[in-house]
Amino acid sequence: MENKLRLSDYLRLCSDFEKDPQNEEVFQKIQDFLAALEVREYLPLADKQVAVLQILEPINNDFDVAGVCSFLENGKISKGLLAYCTNLENDIPFMGFSYFVVDMAYQHGLYDTVMKICEKDCNRLFKMVDDAMNVSNIYRIVQTASLFDKESYDKWLGSMKELKNVLETTNLKELLDTLGDDSEGAKEIINQLRDMATEGVRKEFENEAAKFEKAAKLQGESEEDQDLDDEDDSKVEEIG
């Protein structure tokens, strides 16, 4: 009969050991827990697909780069690695994306114990997750590019340049001259606004232009590949 283990028991033992690292009894209980784990060497592709979806699901929310990396790491452990443990029940699913779960898996042997048996296939799963992230990002860039034809892009580019020109020193100098010599306070405020606005627009302009150029390049490469495929098909038809 399969020896059922609970993730909560492992975490409790790890927590007790963290409080008292000299406690040999708790240390031995952790080793006994790990020895009782039943791990499969291979996870079927259908199960991998489910795991990938579960790992990536929280990334739909808005996070910074560090947040995304942390969630991916958490998911790879709680939804990926643990999927190989056939007799380990995750009885605390609400902690699925907890830093504590990941830290305890790495620090107290759970990760190493499981990976000794399924490392090759588990790395396939992790690569699927990374590939899915890359494909998703490229898809979003191409989708963004498809919203802008050349005319729309040129119009946007022109409006950004006009805004930047309005904030140039020569234009603001005319405004300052109209205020007169006794408006030092106003001059100081406008000078500060000028510096902030000019720098802000410059960064926004560069960032947005880079995004559009990258998206346009990817879209162009995709169209070139399609043209080549069409040419190859035509040649095959001629030969036939």
Image (tube, rainbow, N blue to C red):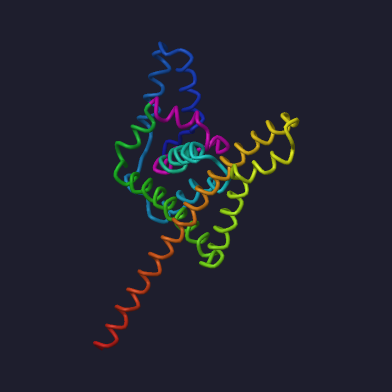
Residue positioned most to the front: 181
Can residue 51 be seen?
A: yes
> Is residue 197 left or right of 126 when viewed as pictured?
right
Asked whether residue 1 is in view, the answer is no
In the picture, the quarter occupied by the N terminus is top left
Q: Position of residue 86 (x, y in %)?
A: 41, 42
The residue stretch that appears in magenta:
82-108
Residue sitting at the far top: 22
Quarter of the rendering containing residue 36: top left
Q: Nearer the viewer, residue 22 or 127?
A: 127
Q: Is residue 226 above or below residue 31?
A: below
Of 222 and 133, which appears nearest the observer? Answer: 222
The answer to whether 177 appears left or right of 68 in the picture is right
Whole-percent x, y for residue 212 in the image:
49, 56
- Using the rendered view, name the quadrant where residue 239 is placed: bottom left
Residue 94 shown in magenta: yes
Location of residue 106 in the rendering, given as x and y in whole percent from the top left corner: 39, 29
Total numbered circles: 0
Task: Decide if residue 178 is on the left or right side of residue 91.
Answer: right
Q: Would residue 169 be counted in the magenta stretch?
A: no
Q: Residue at x 51, y 65 (%)?
A: 146
Residue 111: % across, % down = 37, 33
Q: Check the image and report above or below for 139 versus 61.
A: below
Instruction: Report the front residue among 96 and 205.
Output: 205
Q: Residue at x 72, y 29 (%)?
A: 184
